[in-house]
Amino acid sequence: MITDHVHAIRSAAGRLDGIVRRTPFQPANWLSRLDGDQVFLKLENLQVTGAFKIRGAANKLHVLKEQGYAGPVLAVSAGNHGLAVAVSARSLGWTAAVVVPESAARYKIEAIQNAGAELLKIGAGYDEAEAAAHTLSARRGIPFISPYNDEAIIAGQATIGMEMLEADPSLDVILAPVGGGGLLAGITWALDAASASRPVLMGAQAKNSPGMYESLKAGRIVQVAEEPTIADGIAGNIESESQTFEIIRRGVRGVVLVEESEIRRAVVELYREESMIVEPTGAVALAAWRYHRDQLPGGRVGIVVSGGNLDPATLQDWLNE
């Protein structure tokens, strides 16, 4: 099993070479000064398309190409995954359709359209959009590119964990946001494949959309009632048969829930301390570290800043607050 993961990650890294950026993994001295731990940020907000999702999407589409497929494809997304699929499809000369919920951010919708994808607004929230996308994929007879429940997607996201461990093999803790679980499952695979000592892996999730947290608590995938969250990239429940759940249950010590106000404050802090625009989902792991430090182990800590696609006007409003 681990051998398979090593091969999948190395193959993904080869496909992604020249497509994605090896994003910085840099110290955050302002965080390290707070309690003596050494904190580093993996800056996927500086990634192509502004978020880590391009890793999984590009890997998946190139796997399809290797298998002889030549498009079109269909995806569901709150924004970042859809943009990644649209950009990846366009680079291959394929067409892409992206289903988004009515609640999707205008800023992200415009980016998907500008990338040339067919945009379909269906459903009030992410769960309805995902169900509709599966139906539409079957009706059109084209591949559904899951944001998380796919081995090629997971292997693409695993390259983040691989890069973090290559940059610092002595990490004690890795903290990353989780929704459907593609990123956290990928980092689990990367840790399985590494020869270095294994860091503790922790997830962070919006309290208003705690699907993975509640599923881990129950020991099985459960559907939860949700409240709106500004962390739209990790909103929604988990598919009932998603492989990410078992990977995460085996490899992750726990998931920390964060409040909406804490996420906003983390976005503002990243702007003030790092001069970076980071979207709410991208700041969830930092919010967990800043405001729920008692639930997390310490030492040398790597925090994944997963994306930066935030409307500047929204950031300005939060700064004014």
Image (cartoon, rainbow, N blue to C red):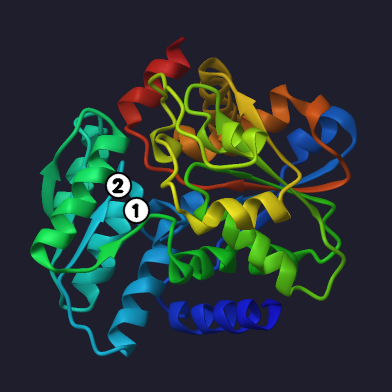
Q: Of 128 and 175, which appears nearest the observer?
A: 128
**Amino acid type indicated by mark 1:** His
Asked if the residues shown at circle 1 and circle 2 are in contact, with their CB atoms under 8 angstroms apart, the answer is yes
Relative placement, left or right, of 61 versus 196 is left
Q: Which mark is residue 52?
A: none
- What residue lies at 43% left-to-right and 58% top-to-bottom? 149
User: Residue 116: in sight, yes or no?
Assistant: no
Q: Nearer the viewer, residue 269 or 88?
A: 88
- In the rendered view, tell whether residue 301 sits above or below residue 165: above
Q: Residue at x 53, y 29 (%)?
A: 210
Badge 2: few (under 14), some or many (20 or more) residues near its Cα, within 10 Å? Answer: many
Q: Position of residue 286 (x, y in %)?
A: 64, 35
203 horizontally vs 111: left or right: right
Which quarter shows the N terminus?
Answer: bottom right
Task: Where is residue 259? Give x, y as percent.
Answer: 57, 19
**To which residue does mark 1 refer?**
81
Q: Residue at x 39, y 34 (%)?
A: 232
Determine whether the residue tagged by mark 2 lies in a helix, strand or loop: loop
Task: Count the numbered circles shown.
Answer: 2
- Which amino acid lies under the numbered mark 2 shown in the image of this protein? Ser
Q: Position of residue 207 (x, y in %)?
A: 55, 23
Q: Residues within 10 Å of mark 1 (few under 14, many from 20)?
A: many
Q: Quadrant of residue 255?
A: top right
Report the Cα–Cα distance between label 1 and label 2.
Answer: 6 Å
Estimate the x, y position of residue 231 in percent, counting from the top left: 44, 31
- The residue that appears at 28% across and 45% down in the rendered structure is 130
Residue corresponding to mark 2: 77
Q: Quadrant of residue 228 in the image?
A: top left
Q: Is 258 in front, or is 124? A: 124
